[in-house]
Amino acid sequence: MTSSDTVDRSETKLPRRDWILLPSIGLLTIFLLGGCLELVGTWMFPWEGRSLTRCMVLNDPSTGLRGIPNTICQGRPAEGQTVEYRFNNHGHRAAMDWAPKLPGTYRIVMPGSSIVFGDGVASEQTIASLLPARLSAQTGRRVEVYNEGMGFGFPRSVALRFDSEVLGAKPDMILWALTPTDIEHVSDLGLNPALEKSGGAGKSASFLTIAREKIHAAFASKSITETLTYVLNQTRTAFLLQHFLDESQSQYLKNVLVGGGPPFLRAEPEAKWLDELRQFDAYAAEVEQKARAANVPFVAVLLPVRAQAALISIGEWPQGIDPYKVDRDVRSIITSHDGIFVDILPGFRNIPNPEQYYFPYDGHPNAAGNEIFANLLAKELNNGPLALKERGR
């Protein structure tokens, strides 16, 4: 070996400090880029939804999540504008206070979860606020719709509050507006674990408290890889990217249907979904029996989620997918207990790109989406088995 070979090798050998310095610079660059994206995402999609919890009871297992009477809160969904949530004298986001109806008024009481509640839209833009004028114009009768929708107002919560809240409002008709999400979370009451343990009635939880509880629950039930994926998915960067991807119908449906799609879209559902349907059947039987005993017509409708609406509008879907199956399942359960089911899904066949009427990432219908629901519901209620004009109730 010559001396020149020794010199050449020593010159090409990377200094030890560079083995630390270069990866550190790379990691710092990644963190800086990620931080910039996070700031851009936070600026474009600010989120103030947690302020709504100040107007809610989050720890009562006898009712599930509910509003505090005579309170007003504001919240801003990341994809929308700041919204005022005003709760009446009974803790409902209704256009009127809890009181006896005026003579000659036909009252529809509408329980349900966050879509009925009007998550992300102003009170006057909710289905319950839009529906009365349409029904009154079509029937020539004075119709009011009392909104008993609530975030996490899934079937178990509706069953718990049915006697005091739904029947207590003295309805002429009960209109239960359901979504596939209601079946997926059939027994979820939306309670906050930290407050359930503390027993602090009516307290609100901070964002950090709720985030800590969610991350703790994720670590307890998921692997480290799954938990890290979950945490990253909560960032504004992930939200920013997903929002713009989901604005494209083709890309959105591709993302939704990967891996066979969600359980409610599968033509051959898995065991977990079938169990959730059985639980829903039990809650539906309970509330329908109570409505029948009170001699109040019981009506249910399935409101499609964003992916369903898009698939129905296109009119085609991959093998193994059926956007109508959950509609048939819910219809079968409701009618088996002598309830009435109205079907609005066919109405989406004539609406081009209906997914644009939902918040892309959040998935709730926007103001235009709520108006579409109200129009389709008014048509089906008036032309369907209820025949409000002829009932004269």
Image (cartoon, rainbow, N blue to C red):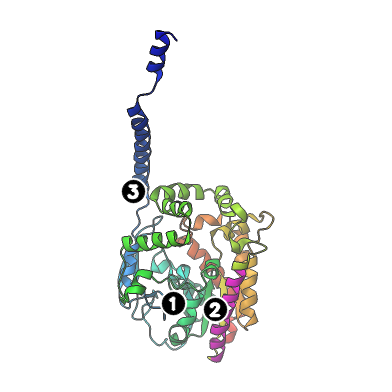
Give the labeled residue for mark 2: 139
Mark 3 or mark 1: name the one nearer the start of the chain. 3
The span shown in magenta is 273-293
Q: Secondary structure at mark 2?
A: helix
Q: Are marks 1 and 2 in contact (CB under 8 Å)?
A: no
- How far from the left and from the top, in percent, is residue 274? 62, 70
- How far from the left and from the top, in percent, is residue 59? 36, 75
Mark 1 or mark 2: name the one nearer the start of the chain. 2
* Residue count near mark 2 (Cα–Cα under 10 Å), binned few <14, some 14–19, many ≥20: some
User: Which of these two is toward me, 204 or 271?
Assistant: 271
> On the image, which quarter does residue 180 sit in?
bottom right
Q: Are marks 2 and 3 in contact (CB under 8 Å)?
A: no
Disc on res. 293:
none
**Residue furthest out toward the front:** 1
Does the magenta portion include 9? Answer: no
Q: Residue at x 61, y 57 (%)?
A: 311
Q: How many marks?
A: 3
Does the magenta portion include 289? Answer: yes
- How far from the left and from the top, in percent, is residue 82? 34, 60
Q: CA gap, disc 1 to disc 2?
A: 23 Å
On-image quarter of the C terminus? bottom right
Q: Secondary structure at mark 3?
A: helix
User: Which of these two is toward me, 389 or 367?
Assistant: 367
Q: Hey, what amino acid is under mark 1?
A: Glu
- How far from the left and from the top, in percent, is residue 123? 39, 69
Q: Hey, what amino acid is under mark 2?
A: Thr
Give the labeled residue for mark 1: 148
Disc on res. 43:
3
